Image: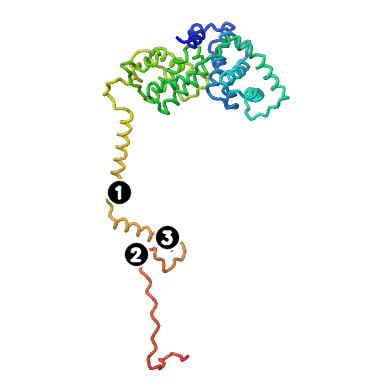
Amino acid sequence: MSERQNLESQWIFTEEELLRTPSVLDGITPEVEREQRGKGCNFILQMGIQLKLPQLTLATASVFLHRFYMQNSLKKHHYYETAATALFVATKVEENMRKFGELVAACVRAAQKNHSLEVHRDDKEFWKWKDCILTKEDYLLESICFDLSIEAPYNLLLQYTNKLGVQTRQLIRTAWTFINDSTLTMLCLLYPSKTIAAAALYCAAKHCGTEFPDQDGKPWWEVIGVLIKDIKRACNYMAMVYEKNPLRGEDGVRYVATPENGAETTRTRARAVNGSSPPAESVSRSGTQSRSGSEGGKRTRDQTRTDEEISEEAVKKKLKLHEETVGNGVEVPENDSSIRGREKAPPPPPPPEKPENGELEEGEVDD
């Protein structure tokens, strides 16, 4: 086990230990604590949007916040103040610094829930947040034991997809979304980053219908070195948190609970010999060919009409349009050659020829 994993293991707790946090011992229920931690992480997100910070920095700040409240109570430290301080520290750790005045102004706007609010340096709220962050920074560093080395699940996710040889855009984006949602929960206190990344990959594979091939007879979770039982427990924890979230709406549960034993174990595993179902690519190709074949048959049936039938139908449409135009009182030129089937007007008679002897005929006047 590497030194980074040893440092991370001291911040991994059991579910029973999360029911005895300082906040719970102060009289806050676990549900309320979970909700207030989520609000603090959402405060980090709102500040990050204003400051255009990368997701890696926001995830690091969320981990600092969760670790802080394993040593302190929510009754004594408001989650907005802790979130602002955690983000300030995270920008230094991840080397994504912003001007301190801009960060303080983002705190004021996020606290007022108004991203278009004009904040001046002589405002009372500006100085309040500035003093709060500078005062709380040392206390936060002391509470997290100055442990600033964090291995984000995002980097591990990309390593796993590269190792397994499956790097589709939809799969990675779905797994990335899972990790984003996990930063709002206490999942980082229950499982290490490698398990969170593997759980994100597992949920994404189930959602996208992707199967990972075995390597040397080993399933994909053994290839990346994570227990399948831990992966499923992490997925079930996310399903539980989302189901109990009052803001989830009425669109159903996003994360479906997964049995820890049974057929679901091999749901994302493509064995070396598997002739029960064709690969997704072949299925999509056959579906495309069948659709193109049906469309081609339709075009063939349309082409069975003769040119005479098409020409006759066009003549009827133009005659009908002409009749409607005349009926509306619109004068149509006599020499309109676009109307087919209409008889042409007879040409005017030629002028009579003069007799060769120069005599005038009856009724003719000499010039």
Q: Is residue 343 left or right of residue 243?
A: left
Neighbor class of circle 1 (other Cα within 10 Å; few <14, some 14-19, many 20+) is few
Amino acid type, callout 1: Asp
Looking at the image, is mark 1 or mark 2 earlier in the sequence?
1
Neighbor class of circle 3 (other Cα within 10 Å; few <14, some 14-19, many 20+) is few
Neighbor class of circle 2 (other Cα within 10 Å; few <14, some 14-19, many 20+) is few
* Dot label at residue 302: 1
| SS category of the residue bearing label 3 | helix
Which residue was labeled with disc 3?
A: 324
Give coordinates of residue 245: x percent, y percent.
Answer: 51, 19
Distance from Cα at disc 2 to Cα at disc 3: 16 Å
Q: Is residue 293 left or right of residue 165?
A: left
Q: For marks 1 and 3, give the one nearer the viewer.
A: 1
* Dot label at residue 362: none
Which residue was labeled with disc 2?
A: 341
Q: Considering only vertical position in the picture, is 282 above or below 21?
A: below
Give coordinates of residue 2: x percent, y percent.
Answer: 46, 10
Amino acid type, callout 3: Glu
Quadrant for residue 307, please give it.
Answer: bottom left
Q: Is residue 277 left or right of residue 158?
A: left
Q: For marks 1 and 2, give the one nearer the viewer.
A: 1
